[in-house]
Image: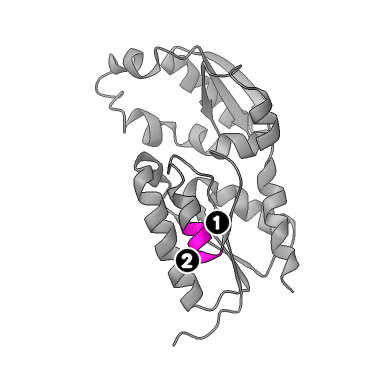
Amino acid sequence: MNAPTTKKVLVIACGALAREIGDLVEANGLSHVALTCLPAILHNRPEKIAGAVQAAIGKAKAEGFEKILIGYADCGTGGALDKVCQAEGVTRIAGPHCYAFYWGNAAFAARGDDDMDAFFLTDFLARQFEAFVVEPLGLDKHPELTEIYFGNYARLIYLAQSEDAGLTEKARAAAEFLGLTFEKRVTGYGDLAEFLKATDKVS
């Protein structure tokens, strides 16, 4: 049997949130919180997310964690992740995707269809645009596919978690690459910050 962990709370999260969750844990002095991240590239195969999270939960329980939080929104799992969370007795951050909870789920929902013509980037995606958008879609080798994939979009909206001039330029360059109008909205950590505050209820 594994010895109980010295950390009481584990956040199992998407790798795309690793930096932001780590920053929040440090800034709020959440020394009792451990973080494990699953590969961000799972977003290209959302049907695998629920199974990967369930396996990580099983491992965490075997290691003796007292509380487990899931740093994923639904993320295209079609409710499969919610079924895992319910079966395992754990909680995930609310929302359909990270764009919604970074902005704030209520504010995002209030926009309705106003941003239906927008493709979103976060800080992570601005950093990893080539690896997570361009290369998986084959746009580096077949730029003519850009119109097929993005022809129905008019804008690229960069939801910025930080004020970083370098990332803003990366996001602006991504918009230019896709032929979209660039727009930036500074969201900070949105609902993610409140979600992580629940960890301080474990003493």
Question: Which residue is identified by label 2?
Answer: 57
Query: In front here: 75 or 192?
Result: 75
Query: In front here: 85 or 34?
Result: 85
| Residue drawn 52% across the image and 54% down it | 13
Q: Quadrant of the C terminus?
A: bottom right
Question: Which residue is identified by label 1?
Answer: 70
- Indicate whether 105 appears above or below 33: above
Let me know if residue 102 appears in the view.
yes
Per the picture, the main secondary structure of the magenta-coloured stretch is: helix
Amino acid identity at mark 2 = Ile
Q: How many marks?
A: 2
Specify whether residue 86 is painted magenta. Answer: yes
Tell me the crowding category of disc 2: few under 14, some 14 to 19, or many 20 or more residues within 10 angstroms, Cα based: many
Amino acid identity at mark 1 = Ile
Q: How is the image coloured?
A: one colour
Label 1 residue SS:
strand
> How far across and down, in percent of the image, does residue 22 sit?
61, 55
Which comes sooner in the sequence, label 1 or label 2? Answer: 2
Magenta residues (range): 84-89
Q: CA distance from mark 1 to mark 2?
A: 9 Å
Q: In the shown orientation, is residue 192 left or right of residue 137?
A: right
| Residue drawn 49% across the image and 77% down it | 63
- Indicate whether 36 appears above or below 181: below
Is the residue under label 2 in contact with that under label 1 (CB below 8 Å)?
A: yes
Tell me the crowding category of disc 1: few under 14, some 14 to 19, or many 20 or more residues within 10 angstroms, Cα based: many
| Residue drawn 45% across the image and 36% down it | 128
Label 2 residue SS:
helix
| Residue drawn 63% across the image and 32% down it | 160
Rendered image quadrant of residue 68: bottom right
Specify whether residue 176 is painted magenta. Answer: no
